[in-house]
Amino acid sequence: MSKREELNNQDQSYGAIIKRQFRKNKPAVWSLRFLYLIIFIGLFANFIANDKPIYAKIDGKTYFPIVKNTLVNLGVAKWPVELARITDWKTVEYESVLRTPIPYSPATTDYFNAQFVGPFDKQNVKSTYWKHWLGTDDIGRDVFSGMIHGTSIAMLVGIISMSIAALIGILVGAIAGYYGDDKLQASRIRVFLNLLFLPIAFFYAFITRGHMIGELFGVSLIKGAIALILSFLIFFGIMVIPNLLAYPLKVIPWLKKKMSIPVDILVMRAIEVLRSVPGLLLILAVVAVFDASIIIVMVVIGLLGWTGIARFIRGEMLRVRNLEYIEAAEALGFSRARIILKHAIPNSLTPVLISIAFGVASAILTESTLSFLNIGVPPETITWGKLLSKGRAATEAWWLAIFPGFAIFITVTIFNLLGDGLADAIDPKQKK
């Protein structure tokens, strides 16, 4: 088969072309493979490094302590009385047991190997299995376990924060790009009442409930999530009031008259204002209201990271809204919400993926910076930034700087290479 015939037999869809172009970029391909490995480590961190066993048989009963611990942390289960009394899982007499490859949790303290024992130093351990392969910190916590669980936190921060940023950025940018400054219209009374109730709704939904949400996240992830969802329901519930009040007041002709809302210029000015304020100051302000929690840090980073995505999707929407299929959908009488969600946004998302890839790297760096400065992250939570911070305080403990610093460098580089690979794959000039 000739090369021309082989090319003709290939899938010529847009997605297939991008995949073929992406595979030509070897650094991006290897970055994707390393990303799979990092995600695997993050997902199964509890089964890789934990002081609790994966499986244990005690007094004739079978237990799965790691699974039970996960359910307890989520707030959907409680420890059995016989397991709740265990303070040191190493000293338990097991009939049979299956331990994790690294027998330490990030918070497990080994008092026999405290005060910065290095990976090549002589360690006071029973056997090679209990060795601290990457050393310990000042109070005997295993650095290897902290690195493994730090991977999980880094992935969670990057993915969750950018999911929040993408949701906000795509919706806000799409509305700004599609409606522009003259397509979105509403009655004068509705605009006035919504502007009046907006700060009230935000105050009662989030400001007054801030400390409670932070405390609940500290107790249980599910309880914190429920409290946060309830705050959003309160916000939208209060915002229903001005829209209901607007109906009886529309009998007044001047109030009923529609006005154009310059949504595009409002969004762009809001983006400029938000980007002009240092992100660290905004994070400090939010942390002062909410209690320290890694979930709160994720939400804050997501709320600060949507501006770049919004500008990307706005630019694409300005191009897409004048294409023939959008005009045909409008001529057929489809609602604008359907046109935006079903037709315009799906055909504008490809360049946004580049911004999201770079955004994940930025989110990981931001979280590491906050952890390094001991801002917003609870003391008991071990992250790469926390390990770096300990390395700064004790320069002789070189392993506390080398290993987490290298992990941050590799992870950020991977996402940057993925972003470059996507940019090259999407660029029509690179197609051959």
Image: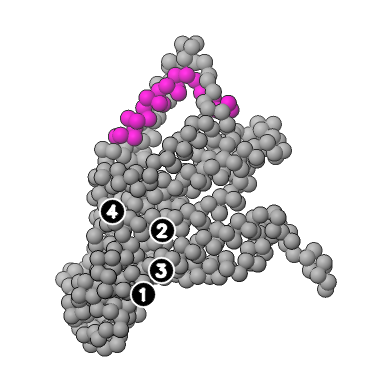
Q: Which residues are magenta?
A: 182-204
* Residue beneath the point at 46% across and 58% down: 361
- The answer to whether 388 appears left or right of 156 in the picture is left
Residue to which mark 3 is pinned: 407
Lower position in the chain sequence, tag 4 or tag 3: 4
Helix or strand or loop: what does disc 4 sit on?
loop
Q: Nearer the viewer, residue 104 or 82?
A: 104
* Residue beneath the point at 49% across and 11% down: 253
Tag in front: 1 or 4: 4
Lower position in the chain sequence, tag 3 or tag 2: 2
Lower position in the chain sequence, tag 3 or tag 1: 1
Asked if the stretch drawn in magenta spans residue 197, the answer is yes
Q: Quadrant of residue 96?
A: bottom left
Lower position in the chain sequence, tag 1 or tag 2: 1
Q: Quadrant of residue 336?
A: top right
Q: Residues within 10 Å of mark 2 (few under 14, many from 20)?
A: many
Separation of residues labelled 1 and 4 (CA atoms): 28 Å
Asked if the stretch drawn in magenta spans residue 410, the answer is no
Tag in front: 3 or 1: 3
Q: What label does residue 289 carry, if any?
A: none
Residue to which mark 1 is pinned: 48
